[in-house]
Image (cartoon, grey):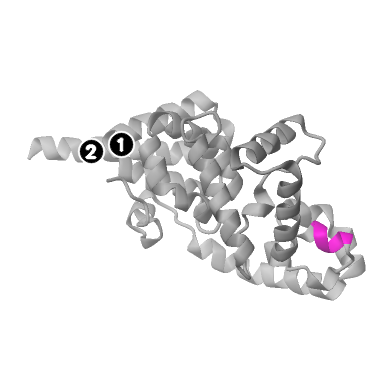
């Protein structure tokens, strides 16, 4: 009985620490984040993975990108089987480009196969996933991004030309804001799918070219913020008991 209580207490103590660390991860270095993750993982893999996906969850969680990617790489290097079982949840809670954290781990080939399989599905779908939006492009000023794009192209077995054509086609299907701006198709912009960085970047243009739709979107956002705040979890108990994170698999 005492042993059971002690184990329960230890699990709660370590998962509580991880929960607090991830809520404040922007101020913390990589080693502190990994240490908290590792200690929590040793006492409860399931609870740890639920907390991890909560930390990345864009809709109902913390929406933390940096700490999630640090941990994802660490898990890919040390616990690849658990990542394999939960890979489908990465774009569900986060974004497709989170998978780049698994490059240079033993899961890199798995990521390439997943990317290619999803692209092939998307080419057949009326409503494709957002993979093509987040895959790295060669036509960028960032050396790191260009290197990742070349690696992605080679890993999926495409030529650069094939890759560009596929991304261009799917991005038009996805209705990416830059594509609509290029073709001056402002009325086709779905503002709810535009990243916040792009909203800020093109704000003046939207007000000039598509004022009514843009302002309607901003008004909807104000109303939705209340509902989004109510969706979010304030305690670790709410996270661990939530059906939203019951998708996580360990065994």
Closer to the camera, 146 or 178? 146
Closer to the camera, 103 or 10? 103
Secondary structure, mark 2, is: helix
x and y, in percent, of residue 223 in the image = 64, 71
Closer to the camera, 111 or 19? 111
Q: Is residue 37 above or below residue 191?
A: above
Asked whether the viewer can see residue 67, the reply is no
Q: Which mark is residue 9?
A: 2
The residue shown at (47%, 26%) is 32
User: For residue 159, what is the image quadrant?
Assistant: top right
Instruction: Please state the extent of the stretch shown in magenta in the rendering.
Output: 178-182
x and y, in percent, of residue 145 in the image = 72, 36
Quarter of the picture containing the N terminus is: top left
Q: Along the horizontal axis of the image, is 86 left or right of 231?
A: left
The residue shown at (60%, 55%) is 119
Task: Tell me the residue that label 1 is attached to.
Answer: 13
Secondary structure mostly seen in magenta is: helix
Crowding near the residue tagged with mark 1, few <14, some 14–19, many ≥20 C-alpha atoms within 10 Å: some
């Amino acid at each position: 009985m005492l042993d059971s209580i002690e184990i329960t207490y230890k699990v709660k103590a370590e998962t509580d620490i991880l929960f607090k660390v991830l809520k404040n991860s922007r101020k913390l270095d990589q080693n502190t984040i990994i240490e908290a993750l590792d200690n929590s993982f040793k006492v409860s893999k399931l609870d740890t993975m639920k907390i991890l996906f909560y930390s990345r969850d864009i809709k109902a969680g913390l929406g933390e990108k940096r700490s999630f990617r640090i941990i994802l790489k660490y898990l890919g290097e040390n616990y690849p089987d658990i990542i394999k079982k939960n890979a489908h949840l990465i774009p569900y809670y986060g974004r497709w480009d989170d998978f780049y954290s698994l490059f240079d781990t033993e899961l890199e080939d798995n990521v390439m196969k997943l990317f290619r399989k999803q692209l092939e599905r998307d080419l057949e779908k009326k409503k494709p996933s957002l993979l093509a939006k987040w895959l790295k492009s060669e036509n960028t000023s960032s050396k790191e991004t260009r290197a990742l794009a070349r690696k992605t192209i080679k890993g999926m077995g495409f030529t650069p030309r094939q890759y560009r054509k596929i991304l261009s086609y799917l991005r038009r299907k996805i209705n990416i804001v830059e594509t609509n701006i290029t073709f001056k198709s402002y009325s086709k912009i779905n503002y709810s799918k535009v990243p916040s960085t792009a909203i800020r970047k093109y704000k003046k243009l939207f007000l000039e070219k598509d004022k009514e739709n843009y302002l309607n979107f901003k008004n909807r956002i104000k109303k939705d913020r209340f509902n989004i705040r109510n969706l979010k979890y304030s305690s670790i108990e709410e996270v661990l008991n939530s059906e939203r994170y019951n998708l996580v698999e360990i065994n």
